[in-house]
C-alpha cells in the first residue's frame, strides 16, 4: 500500500525513568541489562507467514511502535537506548514466528493510533487498553489481562480507597491514556458533591508522572496496574498502591483495520507462543503471570 511504502521512521524519544524508580542492578559478571531476555528463538511458521501482506513479507521485517517508560512492560536498558520488557519480548517472538525481524520504534503513547492508521507502523504494542471506542479506529489482538490502579505517596495512600478518595489531591496521569478521562470524570464528581478540588496533572509520558510523585508535586498517579505495582515495589515504601484495581480490560497489539490478514497472522503467532510455552516464560520473567491469557483474542475488550 502506498501509505506503508512511504512510512517514515519515528524519532526515538530521549526518555529515562527517574533514577529512584528504576532498577540499576549490575551483576558481578558484568551484566549490562536490567533484566536480560531469556526468550528462546522461534521457528517461523510457513502457514502464518503466508498470511502477511506482500510488502511486509518481501521486506522481511515488522515495524512496531513501542514505549520505553512503562515497566515492566517496556523500559530503557542501562545503555539508555535499548528498549526491554515484556512487550518488546512478545512482539519480537511474534515476528520470529512469522519469519520476520522486528524494527522497534519508540513512540509517544498518544501518537500510536494515528501511526498505525497511517501505516507509519505495521503494529504497535504499548500498554493500550482494548476499548470499544478504540476498536472503531484500529483492530486489537489482545495479549494480556490488566486493569487500572492508583499509586500514591506514602502520606496520601492511607486516605485513598478508590477514585472518589482523590478529591482534594493533585493527581498525575499520562496524556492519551484512559486514566486521563477517569480522573477528569472524578474531578467533576468532586466538584458536584462539594468536595475539595481534584487537580489533574497531565504529562506527555509516565516519566513526568513519576517525577511529579517523587518530588511531591503530585499526591497520586493513576495508570495501568502492572506499572503501578512495579513502581510501588521499586520505591521501597515511598509509594504504595491505594484502593483496589478497577476496569478490567485487556491490553492489545494495535493493527490497521484494513489489514485483516495481518491481524490473522499476528493472532495466530501469539496463539502459537501461548501454546508452546514461550508466552508463559515471557510473562513469568517480567512477573506478569497474573495477566496471562489462554487464547489470543481479537477486539476482546467489552467496555
Image: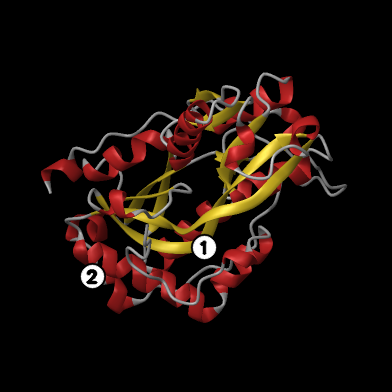
State the CA–CA distance, disc 2 to disc 1.
26 Å
- How crowded pointer 1 is (Cα within 10 Å; few <14, some 14-19, many 20+) is rated as some
User: In the rendered view, would you say 170 is above or below 164?
Assistant: above
Colouring of the image? secondary structure
If you read the primary sequence from the N terminus, does the residue marked by circle 2 or circle 1 appear first?
Answer: 2
Q: Position of residue 35 (x, y in %)?
A: 70, 51
Report the quarter where the C terminus lies.
bottom left
| Residue at x 60%, y 30% (from the top left corner) | 167
> Which of the two residues, 60 or 35, is positioned nearer the viewer here?
35
Residue 89 visible in the snapshot: no
Helix, strand or loop status at disc 1? strand
Is the residue 18 above or below the residue 132 in the image?
Answer: above
Q: Residue furthest left?
A: 2
Residue 5 visible at all: yes
Label placed on residue 51 = 2
Q: Is residue 183 above or below residue 269?
A: above
Res. 65 image quadrant: top left
**Mark 1, residue position:** 145
Where in the figure is residue 193, as x and y percent of width and height? Answer: 52, 31
Could you tell whether 263 is left or right of 286 in the image?
left
Is residue 65 shown above or below 80? below
Q: Which circle, 2 or 1, is nearer the viewer?
A: 1
Amino acid at each position: 500500500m502506498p501509505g506503508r511504502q512511504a512510512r517514515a521512521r519515528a524519532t526515538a524519544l530521549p526518555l529515562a525513568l527517574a533514577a529512584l524508580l528504576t532498577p540499576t542492578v549490575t551483576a558481578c559478571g558484568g551484566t549490562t541489562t536490567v533484566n536480560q531476555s531469556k526468550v528462546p528463538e522461534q521457528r517461523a511458521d510457513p502457514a502464518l507467514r503466508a498470511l502477511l501482506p506482500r510488502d511486509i513479507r518481501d521486506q522481511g521485517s515488522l515495524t512496531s511502535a513501542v514505549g520505553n517508560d512503562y515497566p515492566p512492560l517496556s523500559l530503557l536498558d542501562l545503555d539508555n537506548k535499548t528498549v526491554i520488557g515484556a512487550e518488546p519480548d512478545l512482539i519480537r517472538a511474534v515476528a520470529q514466528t512469522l519469519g520476520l525481524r522486528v524494527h522497534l520504534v519508540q513512540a509517544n503513547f498518544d501518537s500510536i493510533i494515528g501511526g498505525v492508521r497511517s501505516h507509519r507502523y505495521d503494529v504497535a504494542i504499548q500498554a493500550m487498553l482494548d476499548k470499544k471506542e478504540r476498536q472503531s479506529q484500529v483492530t486489537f489482538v489482545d495479549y494480556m489481562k490488566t486493569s487500572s490502579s492508583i499509586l500514591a505517596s506514602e502520606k496520601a495512600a492511607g486516605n485513598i480507597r478508590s477514585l472518589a478518595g482523590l478529591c482534594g489531591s493533585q493527581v498525575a496521569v499520562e496524556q492519551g491514556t484512559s486514566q486521563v478521562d477517569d480522573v477528569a470524570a472524578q474531578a467533576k464528581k468532586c466538584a458536584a458533591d462539594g468536595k475539595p478540588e481534584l487537580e489533574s496533572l497531565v504529562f506527555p509520558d509516565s516519566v513526568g508522572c513519576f517525577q511529579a510523585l517523587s518530588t511531591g508535586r503530585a499526591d497520586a498517579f493513576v495508570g495501568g496496574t502492572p506499572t503501578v505495582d512495579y513502581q510501588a515495589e521499586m520505591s521501597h515504601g515511598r509509594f504504595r498502591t491505594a484502593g483496589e484495581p478497577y476496569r478490567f480490560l485487556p491490553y492489545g497489539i494495535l493493527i490497521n483495520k484494513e489489514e485483516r490478514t495481518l491481524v490473522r497472522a499476528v493472532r495466530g503467532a501469539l496463539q502459537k507462543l501461548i501454546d508452546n510455552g514461550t508466552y508463559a516464560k515471557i510473562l513469568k520473567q517480567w512477573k506478569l503471570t497474573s495477566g496471562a491469557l489462554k487464547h489470543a483474542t481479537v477486539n476482546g475488550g467489552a467496555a
